[in-house]
Image (tube, helix red, strand yellow):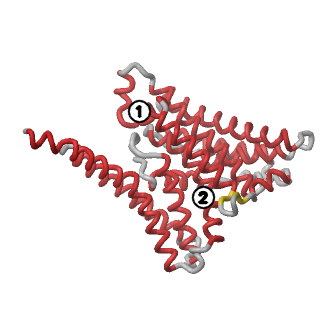
Amino acid sequence: MNEDRGRGPAVGVSNAILRFGLREAGVAVALALIVIFFSLTAPYFATPENFLKIFVQIGINTVLASGMTFVILTGGIDLSVGSVLALCTVVGALIMTNANLPFAVSIPLALLGCMGVGSLCGFVNGFIVEQWKVPSFIVTLGMLNVASGAARVLSNNATITGLPQPFIDFGNLIVFGVFPSIFLVAIGVILIGWFVLRFTVFGRFIYAIGTNEEAVRLSGHNPRTYKIAAFVISGLTAGVAAMVYLLRLNVGSPIAGIGYELNAIAAVIIGGTSLAGGKGSIVGTLVGACIIQVLSTGLQLFGVGDNVKPIVIGTVIVLAVVLDAYRDRFLRVIESR
């Protein structure tokens, strides 16, 4: 008995370390191995210019995936973020190209407009899902089409150019000669999401709802409010991602964001967040977004065509889901010891 008691804390610590290694550190190790592989085999991969390009390209997906993490942690899904991003790029570009507004007013107003439109779309998604208990897959698929159509109507199906030069200059800014401003915006969003999920009561309830929604309800809290809020956050980050898109490409486009929702979901899943909800982290989502972009860039340097790259990335997503299922089983065995 005394021997078992003495071994208890040690076993608990070792189990905690193993759980961290399987769910958190494992994804980072996978990213490191992929980077090392391409650095050794792909021409021009391990160059400052190429890493700078990767930092720029992961910005949009990282911001989109950060909001998607909240929804998936509650056990939902949001397929509308790509089209909401397109709608928000149109709204933001229209505001910034308004000749009656100086750029000092139009730029922050465009940011507020994008965030407001994105949040409204997210609220509609969440409200319908919770009010009428419609699967989030169906509701957000409908919003995908609504937002896409609205973007085409507002823009008259045309690309909007002529954004203010200070805005374009900020998008091209490289801080300390290493970090693009777009990447720093994405990191800022990740840090805010990490703080909310890790250190706030709201974040704890997001995890709790994904783990056992009925237990949250029985404890006297309304899961409906938190789940709607998760969709609002997803829409909000789609609005921020629209501003990142405008910073990077300098145009508002009604066809922007096609397929972006799939990349965002892939980043969350590859990053270790369970589709069943309740398990994962937003830092893992950042790593997942990095893995997708590093794979895409490495394959491009190998000369792999754009028709083949989706096959490879799709295979990685399926493997991530399968590994997640086996990892959960293994963790349950560990926790039962």
Crowdedness of circle 2 by 10 Å Cα count: few (<14), some, many (20+)? many
Task: Give the residue pinned by disc 1.
Answer: 209
Q: Position of residue 218 (x, y in %)?
A: 35, 21
Q: Residue furthest top?
A: 220
Instruction: Where is residue 296? Give x, y as percent.
Output: 55, 67
* Residue tagged 2: 58
Quarter that holds the C terminus: top left
Q: Residue at x 41, y 33 (%)?
A: 209
Q: Position of residue 108 (x, y in %)?
A: 78, 40
Q: CA distance from mark 2 to mark 1?
A: 29 Å
* Residue type indicated by callout 2: Ile
Mark 2 and mark 1 residues within 8 Å of each other at the beta carbon:
no
Position of 125 with respect to 97 (left or right) is left
Q: Is residue 180 above or below residue 277?
A: below
Name the residue rendered at 49%, 67% in the picture. 311
Secondary structure under badge 2?
Answer: helix
Which residue is at 42% across, 58% downward?
27
Judged from this view, the residue extending furthest toward the left is 1
**In terms of sequence position, does the residue under pointer 2 or pointer 1 come before the other?**
2
Q: Is residue 137 visible?
A: no
**Quadrant location of residue 150?**
top right
| Along the viewing direction, whichever of 312 and 15 lies nearer the viewer | 15
Place of residue 199 in the rendered image (x, y in percent of width and height, measured from the top left): 48, 35
In what quadrant of the picture does the N terminus appear? top left
Secondary structure of the residue carrying tag 1 is helix
Quick one: label 1, few (<14), some, or many (20+) residues within 10 Å?
A: many
What's the amino acid at mark 1?
Answer: Ile
